[in-house]
Amino acid sequence: MNTSILLVDDETDFLDSINRVLKRAGYKNVRSDHDPRTTVASLEKGESFDIAILDITMPHIKGTQLLEKIKNKSPNTNVSC
Ligand SMILES: [Mg+2]
């Protein structure tokens, strides 16, 4: 499936397992970031996603702050925290 999915979580084990589940389910376009600052940099470059799944408690940038940035840059992204 070509749906673009963004995963952001500082716990890399959790990130890896969700990533594996999504890939097994056929989602090929999955980006996973363990540092939300990396996500912000990609948003600044104009990258956008169909779906974003975000952790709330992360160092540097909270999930709720990241959600705001995603909604500003890419209002059509469906976000789950
Ligand atoms: Mg966390």
Image (cartoon, grey):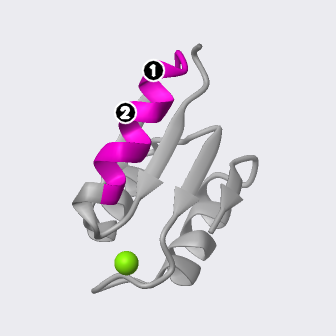
Circle 2 is placed at which residue position?
A: 20
The image quadrant of residue 47 is top left
**Which kind of residue does numbered mark 2 sit on?**
Arg
Residue drawn where x is 65% and y is 38% of the image: 50
- Could you tell me which secondary element the residue under label 2 belongs to? helix
Q: Position of residue 35 (x, y in %)?
A: 26, 67
Q: Position of residue 23 (x, y in %)?
A: 43, 24
Q: Which residues are magenta?
A: 14-29
Observer-nearest of 54 and 71: 54
Q: Are marks 1 and 2 in contact (CB under 8 Å)?
A: yes
Q: Position of residue 6 (x, y in %)?
A: 48, 46
| The image quadrant in which ligand 1 is located | bottom left
Distance of label 1 from label 2 (alpha carbons): 6 Å
**Which kind of residue does numbered mark 1 sit on?**
Arg
Is residue 29 in view from this perspective? no
Is residue 19 in view from this perspective? yes
